[in-house]
Image: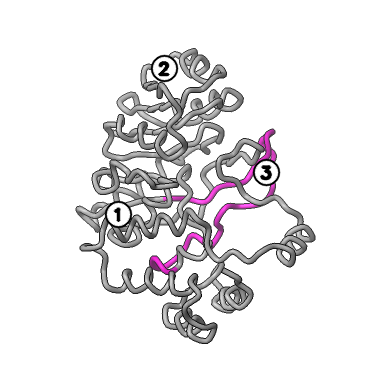
Amino acid sequence: MISVCIATYNGEKYIKEQLNSILNQISENDEVIISDDHSTDDTIKIAKEIGDDRIKIYYNPIEKGYAKNFENAIKKSIGDIIFLSDQDDVWLPQKIEILYNEMIICEITNPDKPIIVHHDVYIVDENLKNSGIRFLKKKGKVSGLKDLLFGNPKVQGASSMFNRKLKEICFPLPVSVPLHDLYLSYICECFGIRKYISEPLMLYHQHANNQIGVSSYSIYERVTKFFNKKIILADENEKKTLIILENQFSNKLSNVDKDIIRDYFKILGNKIGFGCKVSIVLKNRFNSGGSILKLILKIRNYNG
C-alpha cells in the first residue's frame, strides 16, 4: 500500500491541481494523507470537494510548523511505502510507477535497510512555465555523508519516497529537528540506501510562498551577490541536524561518519588554522558543489 503525505497551510491556489496529479496515479487501495496546519483559506474545502475517499484529512488545532506538520501526516499513514508531497506542485505521469519500481529493486537487494528514493524536478513559475532550471541535475549523485555537507544539495522532501523501515527509525522526530527531509536523508546516508533518479518527475512551483525555494537570480545578480555577501559555509539547519544525528545515534554511527562530523565542525570553528582546515578537506574530500577547490576558497574567506 502507498501513502502520499501532504502538509498543507493556506494552499488553496494549487492544492486541487496537485491532488488530481496524485490521485490519477495511485490505486483504489492507496491513500492520500493531508495534515493541515490550521489553514485560514479554502484549502480543506477544496480538498473535500474533490470527493475522493482516498483523501484523509487531519487538522492541527494549533500551528505545528513545517517539519511537525509533515510528521503528523506520516504518523497517520499506514502504507508500507510513503511519498512526501508539497501542496503546490504537480506530479508528472508515471512518477509513482518509476519510484515504486526502484524501491522494490532496492528492497530486494537490501532487505531490512532504511531506503529513500528521490528524483530531480523541473522548476516552473506560477503559470507552470518551465524555467529551464532543474533542482539537482548531477548533484544528486553523491557518495556518502561527506557530500551532503557545506550547503551541498540534499534530498528534496517533496521529490522523495521512503520505506517503512526508515519511518520506524526516524519517527517520532526529535523535538528540535528543523527539516524532516534533511534528517531523513542523513539517516539513510549513514545507515541505509539512497537512490537518486536524475529524470525530472515533478513540476516544482517557484513562487513567493514556497517554504524552500530555488534561486532565480540572473548570472549578474548571482555574481554581485557572491562578492558582496558574507561567506556561509553551512546553514543553521545543516549544523543543527548533524548535532541531533550524532546525539540520537552516537552508538550506531560508524567511526568514519563520526570522524566526518567531527572534522566538519573543526572547519566551521576557529581553533585551527587555514592550513589544517585544508588538510581536513583533502583527507575527507569535502567539497562545495562537487568542487574541493571551491570549498577551500570559501574557507579561506570565511569569517565564522
Tell me how far mark 1 sits from mark 2, CA to CA.
31 Å
Vertical relation: 286 (above or below) 10: below
Chosen colour scheme:
one colour
Q: What amino acid type is highlighted by mark number 3?
A: Asn
Residue at the spot 39% in from the left edge and 65% down from the top edge: 145
Per the image, the residue denoted by label 2 is: 52
The percent position of residue 297, horizontal first and vertical second, equals: 62, 77
The percent position of residue 187, horizontal first and vertical second, equals: 33, 56
User: With 35 as the anchor, is 173 left or right in this view?
Assistant: left
Q: Tell me the SS state at disc 2.
A: loop
Q: Tell me the SS state at disc 3.
A: strand
Per the image, the residue denoted by label 1 is: 106
Q: What amino acid type is highlighted by mark number 2?
A: Asp
Residue in the foreground of this view, choosing between 18 and 41: 41
**The residue stretch that appears in magenta:** 118-146
Q: Quadrant of the C terminus?
A: bottom right
Residue at the spot 61% in from the left edge and 25% down from the top edge: 13
